[in-house]
Image (cartoon, grey):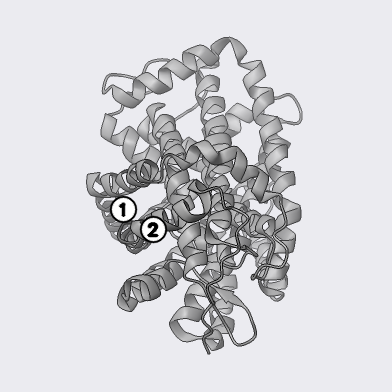
């Protein structure tokens, strides 16, 4: 097992070397420039996310699609993931995580646009879309679409299943002594009960769940930032300086190379917001949208809320806490996070516990849908029930296995899954620009797309 863990860790490190960092950030930057900085449209996008697009083709409302996407992305990566990035890459990792989010808004926009542009519908009217259909219909590269779905079906067991279950079980065990076996069993039963109702059941739970859990956690972060008010300026300077300096970080932090800060910051940024990963477009394709650009804008807000807001808040909370309390153990992500929230009298541990539990649980729900659509593409609906059995069992297993190994496997699968999606974004960037010019740059967001949606068996 030790040998296996060592091999997985080496593979993860290799996959997340400079080539992946350049490919990922390069795509973010390329689309940002070519699409004329869609980040500047974020407030228009937020407004659209709360607007109902009536009389449009789709299975769920734009907000329900966004909520399901956010449920999948706002997970332990926002809390434990950011803390892990800081412990391994230093305070500078927060900057790279944030940059990944800001630039990633353009990539998430492009993913959402292609998802709606190339979506198809089944004989019963259900919408299907995502990178696999963009690769197949837009680039005629079905072999790469198949690879994407294989990587997604495997990645889902990491980023969307075992990592989340492990976070919940370990937290409950360490905080209240609840058996990890009992926690694993309860989570498995709850997820199994909800996914029986398919996308609409998942979307309904997520639409109620996501706003509550996000606001609850953000309030906790603001309380800590208020308590650390005198140290915020120093913490901010430390984050910026550490992102570009190989010298010792100071303020109790161990020194870290620029490469380490960038590697862990970008890896955790992608793990958190999934821009470039290709998962969120799958649910974006199911949204009721009159044209591809409207849903693309709505999808882009997911990265804004997830990374630009929540991950940035988490990063400032953790770094400022270490600056304010140098005695805090910041060598382990989970320990650092717990210590920071423990500074809030009485309710601190509860805020963190509820935040991790709700974030992790909702992520499992969102990724259940993603994984099932990948399996459906590979073998049809007949395999979904079989996959669900493995999925529910994996939740239990994830609750009781080693976390370090889980994170390394998740990072590796994320990288492999991202590559086909980034290929589709780059090669179809001309289509993205064409659609953006037609609907957004020409102020025709209310124009209805008149193209027929192909039907498949």
The image quadrant where one finds the N terminus is bottom left
Q: Nearer the viewer, residue 212 or 13?
A: 212
Q: Position of residue 346 (x, y in %)?
A: 76, 28
Whether residue 166 appears in this view of the structure is: no
Position of residue 71 in the picture relative to residue 10 (left or right) = right
Is 21 placed left or right of 133 in the picture? Answer: left
Residue 332: x, y in percent?
Answer: 46, 36
Q: Which residue is mark 2?
A: 409
Residue 192 in the image: state x and y as whole percent. 68, 72
Single out the residue that lies furthest toward the top: 230
Q: Count neighbours of disc 2 (C-alpha within 10 A) and say few if under 14, some if 14 to 19, many if 20 or more.
A: many
| Quarter occupied by residue 432 | bottom left
Residue at image position (24%, 51%) is 14
Q: Is residue 256 visible?
A: yes
Q: Residue at x 23, y 48 (%)?
A: 19
Helix, strand or loop at mark 2: helix
Lower sequence index among marks 1 and 2: 1
The residue that disc 1 covers is 12
User: At 43% from the left edge and 63% from the top edge, which residue is drawn?
Assistant: 155
Say above or below: 426 vs 379: above
Q: Nearer the viewer, residue 34 or 158?
A: 34
Up-down relation of residue 163 to residue 420 (above or below): above
Q: Is residue 309 above or below residue 245?
A: below
The crowding category of the residue bearing disc 1, from other C-alpha atoms within 10 Å (few below 14, some 14 to 19, many at least 20), is: many
Distance Cα–Cα, label 1 vs label 2:
7 Å
- What residue do we see at 46% from left, 37% from top? 102
């Amino acid at each position: 097992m030790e040998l296996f863990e060592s091999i997985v860790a080496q593979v993860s490190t290799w996959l997340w070397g400079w080539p992946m960092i350049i490919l990922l950030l390069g795509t973010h930057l390329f689309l940002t420039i070519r699409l004329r900085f869609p980040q500047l449209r974020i407030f228009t996008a937020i407004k659209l996310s709360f607007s109902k697009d009536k009389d449009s083709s789709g299975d769920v409302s734009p907000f329900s699609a966004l909520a399901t996407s956010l449920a999948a992305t706002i997970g332990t990566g926002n809390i434990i993931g950011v803390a892990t990035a800081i412990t391994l890459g230093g305070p500078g990792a927060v900057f790279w995580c944030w940059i990944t989010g800001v630039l990633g808004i353009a990539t998430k926009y492009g993913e959402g646009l292609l998802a709606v542009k190339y979506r198809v519908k089944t004989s019963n009217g259900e919408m299907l879309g995502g990178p696999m259909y963009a690769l197949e219909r837009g680039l005629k590269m079905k072999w790469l679409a198949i690879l994407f779905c294989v990587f997604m079906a495997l990645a889902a067991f990491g980023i969307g299943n075992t990592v989340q279950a492990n976070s919940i079980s370990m937290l409950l065990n360490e905080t209240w002594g609840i058996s990890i076996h009992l926690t694993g069993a309860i989570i498995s039963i709850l997820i199994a009960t909800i996914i029986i109702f398919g996308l609409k059941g998942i979307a309904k739970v997520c639409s109620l769940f996501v706003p509550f859990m996000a606001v609850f956690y953000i309030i906790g972060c603001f309380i800590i930032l208020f308590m650390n008010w005198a140290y915020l300026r120093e913490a901010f300077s430390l984050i910026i300086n550490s992102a570009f300096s190989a010298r010792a970080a100071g303020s109790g932090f161990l020194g870290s190379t620029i490469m380490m800060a960038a590697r862990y910051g970008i890896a955790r940024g992608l793990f958190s917001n999934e821009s470039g990963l290709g998962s969120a477009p799958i649910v974006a394709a199911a949204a009721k949208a009159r044209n591809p650009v409207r849903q693309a804008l709505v999808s882009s807000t997911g990265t804004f809320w997830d990374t630009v807001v929540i991950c940035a808040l988490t990063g400032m909370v953790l770094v400022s806490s270490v600056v304010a309390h140098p005695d805090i153990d910041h060598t382990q992500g989970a320990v650092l996070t717990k210590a920071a929230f423990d500074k809030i009298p009485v309710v601190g541990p509860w805020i963190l516990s509820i935040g991790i539990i709700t974030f992790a649980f909702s992520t499992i729900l969102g990724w259940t849908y993603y994984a099932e659509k990948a399996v459906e593409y590979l073998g049809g609906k007949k395999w979904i029930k079989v996959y669900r059995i493995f999925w529910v069992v994996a939740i239990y297993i994830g609750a009781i296995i080693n976390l370090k190994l889980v994170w390394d496997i998740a990072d590796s699968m994320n990288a492999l899954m991202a590559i086909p999606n980034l290929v589709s974004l780059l090669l179809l960037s001309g289509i993205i620009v064409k659609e953006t010019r037609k609907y957004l740059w020409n102020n025709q967001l209310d124009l209805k797309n008149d193209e027929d949606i192909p039907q498949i068996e």
